[in-house]
Image (cartoon, rainbow, N blue to C red):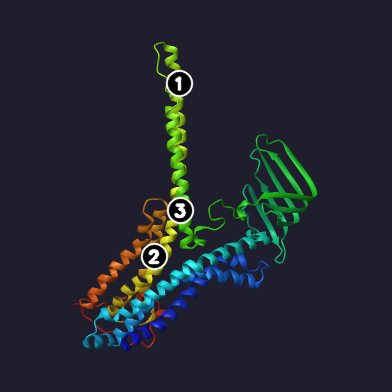
């Protein structure tokens, strides 16, 4: 028991350090991506902080498994570097026994992450989406940049040269209206206000002191110019609102727990079954609706042939329509199944990464953060590539959702078991002295002892 506590103690500090560092990196990346949309737009500081807090949830899901891998590499690398692993082995403690406590801790962390995925992450994603929609409704100028054409509103190109930070006032406005393909309308105005209608379906622009230039695309000689003091333009705002007709209301697949998604899958399966029944009945009815026997007279035979051809065409159209519906429902079912398996596959990675981190740490015999971060990044990129690729293939029905989400765990797990067996038998060690030049100087260990030359047996 004392041995297990000591090994876990060596994991604790590296885990916290790696988690904090990775969270900072993800948070910095998030701020760089959304800074131009949030900073200087007149938003309250509390609203910006609230949006960041909601988005921390998906960062935790990615950070925890990687932090487990980094901590395993650092802990076992440091113990191997200090010859503690050698002392334990000489005392009759095998590598398998050393890994019992980290594997148990990885299972506990994975279980907690699973609870987080089902209870916290869906609500956080939903709140983040709703907050972004509220910001877009209250601050429609967020989609506009001074001096840059915005085409987020369909059939319109909008250029503004000045935006009030604390209000929705815009100045020096130019709007190209493409709603009528036969006409080209260009609206200019000195100033105006932009806001949403009460039902959030229209984006309203109240313009003042401007002109409307109208030409006909077919007759270039026709031209009309209108001068106005006040002019209102109502644009379709569907892209700014979220409307979805589904069994789960306005929540997407990443805003539901696994239990809720299973209920959605059951509902979609029943709908798909109904489409299959309709397809079978309608196809049979269309094909066999006309069963009048041919007669000897030629006109009657021609009429029967025409009816048969029409019935076949109708059956073809009905078949294609129902097949498309069935394929769409199957795609939706696969999409939800992918998210269900992802909620379990990512927590399971906490155990898989211990399997690969512990033997790699023993082989590398380096406990610094730079080496651990480099190796962890390499394996995590492989894991993430398989995970994203499997998700895309599963969404396109080219791979089963289970295999698409669990293939990364299976592959990395097999590699981990192989390395664990090799390391336990002391078959091979890894000398990274020749690879240190590829590690950035900022990540290299400070006051690190000279490298030990370990021959490969």
Q: Does dot 2 land on a helix, a strand or a loop?
A: helix
Q: Residue 267: percent from the left, percent from the top?
A: 48, 52
Q: Earlier in the sequence, mark 2 or mark 1?
A: 1
Instruction: Name the element at disc 1.
Output: helix
Indicate the quadrant containing the C terminus: top left, top right, bottom left or bottom right: bottom left
**Residues at marks 3 and 2, CA–CA distance in whole angstroms:** 21 Å
Foreground tag (3 vs 2)? 3
Judging by the rendered image, the residue that carries numbered circle 2 is 345
Does residue 385 appear to the left or right of 24 in the view shown?
A: left
Separation (CA) of disc 3 from disc 1 = 43 Å
Q: Do residues under tags 3 and 1 come within 8 Å of each other at their CB atoms?
A: no
Crowd band around label 2 with a 10 angstrom C-alpha radius: few (<14), some (14–19), many (20+): many
Asked if residue 67 is positioned above or below residue 393 in the image, the reply reads below
- Disc nearer the start of the sequence (3/2): 3
| Left or right: 303, with 131 as reference point | left
| Residue 221 placement, left or right of 53 | right
Q: Which residue is mark 3?
A: 266
Quarter of the picture holding the N terminus:
bottom left
Residue drawn 40% across the image and 77% down it? 440
> Which circle marks residue 306 in the picture?
1
User: Of 325 and 53, which appears nearest the observer?
Assistant: 325
Q: Residue 194: x, y in percent? A: 71, 57
> Which numbered disc covers residue 449?
none
Tell me the residue at 45%/30% (across/down): 286
């Amino acid at each position: 028991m004392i041995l297990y506590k000591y090994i876990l103690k060596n994991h604790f500090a590296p885990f916290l350090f790696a988690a904090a560092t990775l969270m900072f990196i993800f948070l910095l990346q998030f701020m760089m991506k959304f800074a131009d949309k949030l900073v200087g737009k007149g938003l309250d500081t509390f609203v910006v902080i609230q949006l960041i807090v909601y988005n921390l949830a998906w960062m935790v899901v990615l950070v925890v498994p990687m932090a487990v891998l980094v901590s395993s590499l650092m802990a076992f690398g440091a113990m191997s570097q200090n010859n503690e692993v050698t002392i334990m082995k000489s005392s009759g403690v095998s590598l398998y026994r050393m890994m019992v406590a980290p594997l148990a801790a990885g299972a506990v962390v994975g279980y907690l992450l699973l609870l987080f995925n089902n209870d916290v992450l869906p609500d956080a994603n939903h709140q983040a989406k709703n907050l972004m929609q509220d910001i877009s409704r209250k601050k429609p100028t967020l989609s506009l940049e001074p001096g840059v054409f915005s085409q987020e509103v369909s059939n319109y190109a909008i250029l503004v040269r000045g935006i009030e930070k604390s209000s929705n006032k815009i100045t020096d406005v130019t709007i190209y209206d493409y709603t009528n393909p036969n006409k080209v309308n260009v609206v200019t105005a000195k100033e105006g206000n932009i806001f949403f209608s009460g039902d959030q379906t229209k984006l309203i622009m109240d313009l003042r002191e401007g002109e409307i230039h109208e030409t006909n695309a077919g007759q270039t000689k026709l031209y009309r110019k209108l001068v106005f003091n006040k002019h209102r333009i109502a644009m379709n705002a569907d892209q700014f609102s979220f409307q979805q007709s589904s069994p789960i209301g306005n929540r997407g697949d990443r805003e539901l727990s696994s239990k809720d998604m299973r209920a959605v899958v059951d509902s979609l399966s029943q709908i798909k079954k109904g489409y299959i029944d309709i397809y079978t009945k309608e196809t049979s009815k269309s094909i066999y609706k006309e069963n009048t026997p041919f007669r000897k007279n030629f006109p009657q035979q021609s009429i029967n042939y025409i009816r048969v051809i029409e019935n076949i065409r109708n059956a073809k159209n009905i078949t294609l329509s129902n097949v498309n519906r069935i394929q769409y429902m199957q795609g939706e079912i696969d999409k939800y199944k992918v998210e269900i398996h992802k909620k379990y596959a990512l927590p399971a990675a906490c155990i898989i990464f211990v399997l690969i981190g512990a033997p790699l740490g023993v082989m590398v015999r380096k406990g610094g953060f730079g080496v651990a971060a480099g190796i962890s990044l390499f394996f995590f990129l492989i894991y993430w590539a398989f995970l994203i690729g499997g998700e895309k293939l599963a969404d396109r029905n080219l791979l089963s959702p289970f295999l698409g989400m669990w293939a990364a765990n299976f592959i990395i797990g097999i590699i981990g078991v192989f390395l664990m067996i090799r390391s336990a038998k002391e078959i091979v060690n890894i000398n990274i002295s020749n690879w240190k030049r590829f590690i950035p100087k900022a990540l290299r260990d400070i006051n690190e002892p000279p490298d030990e030359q370990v021959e490969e047996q």
